[in-house]
Image: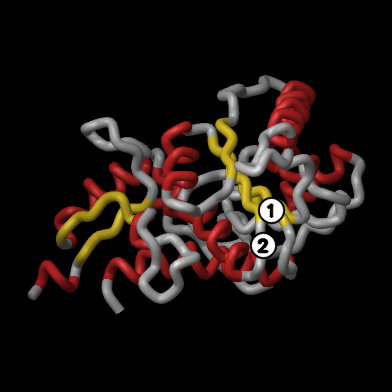
């Protein structure tokens, strides 16, 4: 079990972010992924994040 | 703040708000219905408020396994996929779900029975009803999520003819103007709006 670095009794909340997309161009794909609840390889989708700032660096 | 922290902030705010509204006490037990982001974070928030036993339920087995494997909950329950055609059928489904959920056991063998708190994180009618049924003394239900209006929740409560305290934690599209593009197709999950009570 991955735990929070700050509090070992708390799971690593980052685990909830199951799918990551880069940039505004990926918004449509990210929304579709979030709505389907399952990705192209059959893995479940819990929370999707679009990294915008990082992709603009 | 990174994009990743920002993505967690909204459901975490919902979860913390729900726990505060429920006034979760140390040593208590809670049932979380729905193992999506909000449900998982409700489980974490309840634990941080001192809840010592958390059971989580979802219709998707992988989500329940994920919650258990990663320490979000102590016990899990996979909800049978059933859709009632009438309100009577849905109520019966809710009763069956509540009954089965109460028989789930924690790792130490203790039955879930009825929990001190319920966090209903799906908005599905039968789940809302079941969330009330699995409560310890049927006086409190905290729906932190949003696919259901408070008016609709009160309808469900009225059907059960029970005395239930249902804090008006969150509103949904009927109360908040949602962009048309979000209300079309299958993008319903993007309608999440948080509003202080």
- Mark closest to the chain's N terminus, 2 or 1: 1
Residue linked to disc 2: B51
Crowd rating for badge 2 (residues with CA inside 10 Å; few <14, some 14–19, many 20+)? many
**Farthest bottom residue in view:** B1
Residue A16: percent from left, percent from top: 38, 55
Q: Residues within 10 Å of mark 1 (few under 14, many from 20)?
A: many
Q: Residue at image x 42%, y 51%?
A: B70
Residue B51 percent location from the top left of the image: 67, 62
| A39 or B111, nearer to the observer | B111
Q: Where's residue B155, x and y in %?
A: 79, 44
- Residue B30 is labelled as 1
**Subunit under mark 2:** B
Residue at the (64%, 65%) spot, across then down: B18
Residue A25: name its quadrant.
bottom left
> Do discs 2 and 1 share a chain?
yes
Q: In this view, does A28 lie above or below A38?
A: below
At 10% from the left edge and 72% from the top edge, which residue is drawn? A56
Residues tagged 2 and 1 counted as in contact (Cβ below 8 A)? yes
The residue drawn where x is 71% and y is 25% is B93
């Amino acid at each position: 079990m991955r735990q929070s670095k700050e509090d070992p009794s708390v799971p690593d909340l980052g685990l909830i972010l199951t799918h990551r997309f880069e940039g505004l161009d990926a918004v449509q794909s990210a929304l579709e992924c979030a709505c389907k609840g399952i990705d192209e390889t059959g893995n479940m989708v819990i929370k999707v994040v679009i990294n915008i700032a990082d992709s603009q660096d | 703040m990174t994009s990743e922290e920002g993505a967690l902030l909204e459901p975490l705010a919902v979860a913390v708000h729900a726990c505060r509204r429920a006034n979760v006490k140390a040593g208590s037990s809670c049932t979380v219905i729905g193992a999506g982001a909000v449900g998982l974070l409700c489980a974490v928030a309840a634990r941080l408020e001192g809840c010592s036993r958390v059971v989580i339920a979802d219709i998707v087995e992988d989500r329940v396994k994920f919650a258990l494997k990663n320490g979000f909950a102590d016990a899990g329950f996979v909800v049978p996929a059933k859709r009632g055609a009438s309100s009577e059928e849905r109520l019966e489904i809710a009763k069956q779900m509540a009954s089965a959920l109460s028989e789930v056991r924690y790792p130490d063998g203790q039955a879930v029975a009825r929990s001190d708190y319920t966090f209903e994180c799906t908005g599905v009618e039968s789940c809302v009803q079941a969330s009330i049924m699995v409560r310890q003394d049927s006086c409190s239900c905290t729906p932190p999520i949003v696919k259901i209006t408070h008016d609709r929740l009160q309808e469900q409560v009225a059907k059960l003819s029970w005395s239930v305290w249902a804090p008006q934690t969150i509103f949904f599209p009927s109360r908040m103007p949602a962009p048309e593009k979000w209300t079309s197709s299958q993008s319903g999950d993007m309608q999440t709006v948080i509003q202080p009570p």
